[in-house]
Structure formats: structure tokens, C-alpha cells
Amino acid sequence: MILIADAGSTKTRWILVNNERMVIGKFESAGLNPTVFDEETLSKNVARNTELLNHAPYIKQIYFYGSGVDDKVANEKMSKVLSEMFDKAKIEIFSDMLAAARATAGKEEGIVSILGTGSNSAYYDGEKVVKSNGYFGYILMDDASGNWFGKQLLRDYFFNKMPKQLKQQFKQAYQIDEKKIITNLYQKEQPNTYLAGFAPFMQEHYRSKYIKDLLYKGFDIFVSQQLSSYKQYREVPLHFNGSIAYVFKKELLDVINDHQLKVGKIVKDPVEELINYHV
């Protein structure tokens, strides 16, 4: 059997398939970012899903895609953890960006983006990620991500740029408290994940002109600043992975069409699409 994983810092999705592409099981576990977590935490985060581990003796191949695995030391750490738990399996570890590329572009050339809690992009030649603008974290990057939109919502709330009725609904939904916000942003870990937690408000109030304008603004910044930096961006399809891209597909497509660019695939979760690539 073959196990495919799509891992981030907050959660990991696993899908188990046989050689006939039949799905045997789908599982979720906590985040598995080897740059963020030590070996003990990584092991515990896998071990909590006992149902997944019950299949370990029968798994012969693992394709693990995740964030934080580009660094050699982190990659080896993740490989060691998986080898100890799935000792019968051959393990291959790849970046989340390569997962996004294989899930959408397959074996064709394209520019691939991830728009989820964070955001990133890369040029893919149909086989490997050739060029990325680099990812410098949630402070410098992450345009049009859940983190970015959450930040804009908070700023507009406090600067009175949010419509009055929407501002009241935002306050009630999140029990807005200045001290709590400061604590989460500057004293706790993963402030980007905290900020992304405000993004679902956009889906709940999707019909608001304010929300639609915010979505267009975010996607336009991402396309005009990040994607336009690739020399091929007008020639190849633009593919997208992630919850923000998928949920707000209409606004994203409108912005791409406004820029007269080529639309590729937009998927929420790459893990199931990777079955077609690997099996």
C-alpha cells in the first residue's frame, strides 16, 4: 500500500491507497513541520492517530510532502521519525510547493501558488520547482493569505475602515479585546495562524461589498507583485492550492482575467490529486 501525506504546521492530511488507486483510508493528525517541532513532538503528533499506525506493517511506500523540509537537517529529522514508525516503507520527502505543483500542473509547465494560512509561489518546469522568489515568513511575505486577510480585517476594525454593522458583527464573533490580541500576536507562538483565524469571517459575510473589495485587493497585490516577478507569468497557466484560493475562487479568477493571464487548476487540498500523480 502507498501512503501520501500533506503536512503543515497545524495539521497533516494522510491518504492510504492500493496499487489500483483504491482509497483504503483518509486520516488527519497534528502538524508535522520539522523546522518548528523537535523529534519527540513530531513522533507524538503521528502516534496520536492510532488508526493510521494500525496500517503501518502493510505500507510499502510513503510520499511525504510538507512545509519546513527543504532544509537538509529538518528533512533528515522528518525521515528518521517516519522510518521509526513505518519501518517497512520506503520514504520520500518533498516540499509542500512540489505537492502543489504535482497536484495541479502534473507534468506540465506552470506557475504554482499556495494561498492558505500563508502564501507562496514558484515556477515549475513540469518536473521540478525551478525558481521560487523565496519565502521570508509571515512578516515579509504571505500576501493574499489567511494571515494577510486576517491582518487587514483587524487593521480596518481598529482604524474604522470597516462598515459599522460589519464592525459590530466582527466584534461579537471574535470577542475583540486589545490585550488578548497583543498577547496572541507578540507573546504566543504562531501569530500567523492566529491572524488567519479571522479569515473565515469573510466567507460568513461574503455578500458584503467591503469583503469583496478586500478580496480583490489582496488577490491583485499577489498577482501584480509576486506572480509578475516570474518572466513566464504571461505565458504559462497559473495554478493555485489552498483554502483561500478555493473558497474565494470567483474573485481570484476575476483578478487573473483582469490581468489577462492564463488560468490553471484551483484545488483546495492537493493530497487526493497526488494519487493520480503517484499511482
Image (spheres, rainbow, N blue to C red):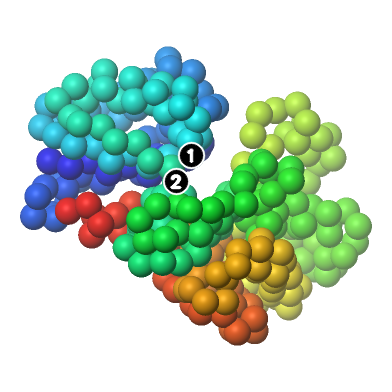
Give neighbour class at mark 2: few <14, some 14-19, many 20+ (Cα, 10 Å): many
> Where's the N terminus, which quadrant?
top left
| Residue 51 shows in the view | no
Looking at the image, tell me whether mark 2 or mark 1 is earlier in sequence order.
1
From the viewer's perspective, is residue 40 above or below residue 152?
above
Alpha carbons under labels 2 and 1: distance apart? 5 Å
Q: Amino acid at mark 2?
A: Asp
Q: Which residue is mark 1?
A: 67
2 and 1 marks in contact (CB < 8 Å)? yes
Q: Residue at x 14, y 55 (%)?
A: 21
Q: Residue at x 30, y 25 (%)?
A: 82
Please count the marks in the image. 2
Q: Nearer the viewer, residue 247 or 221?
A: 221
In the rendering, which numbered label is found on residue 119? Answer: none
Please state the horizontal and vertical placement of residue 34, each as a whole percent of the image.
47, 27
Please state the horizontal and vertical placement of residue 186, each as a whole percent of the image.
78, 31
| Residue 92 shows in the view | yes
Give neighbour class at mark 1: few <14, some 14-19, many 20+ (Cα, 10 Å): some
Please state the horizontal and vertical placement of residue 103, each as a whole percent of the image.
35, 59
Dot 1 falls on a residue whose secondary structure is loop
Dot 2 falls on a residue whose secondary structure is helix
Which image quarter: residue 188? top right
Q: Residue at x 50, y 30 (%)?
A: 71
In the rendering, which numbered label is found on residue 96? Answer: 2
Please state the horizontal and vertical placement of residue 117, each as a whole percent of the image.
58, 49
Q: Amino acid at mark 1?
A: Ser
Q: Is residue 73 left or right of residue 234?
A: left
Q: Residue at x 38, y 41 (%)?
A: 94
Q: Nearer the viewer, residue 219 or 236?
A: 236
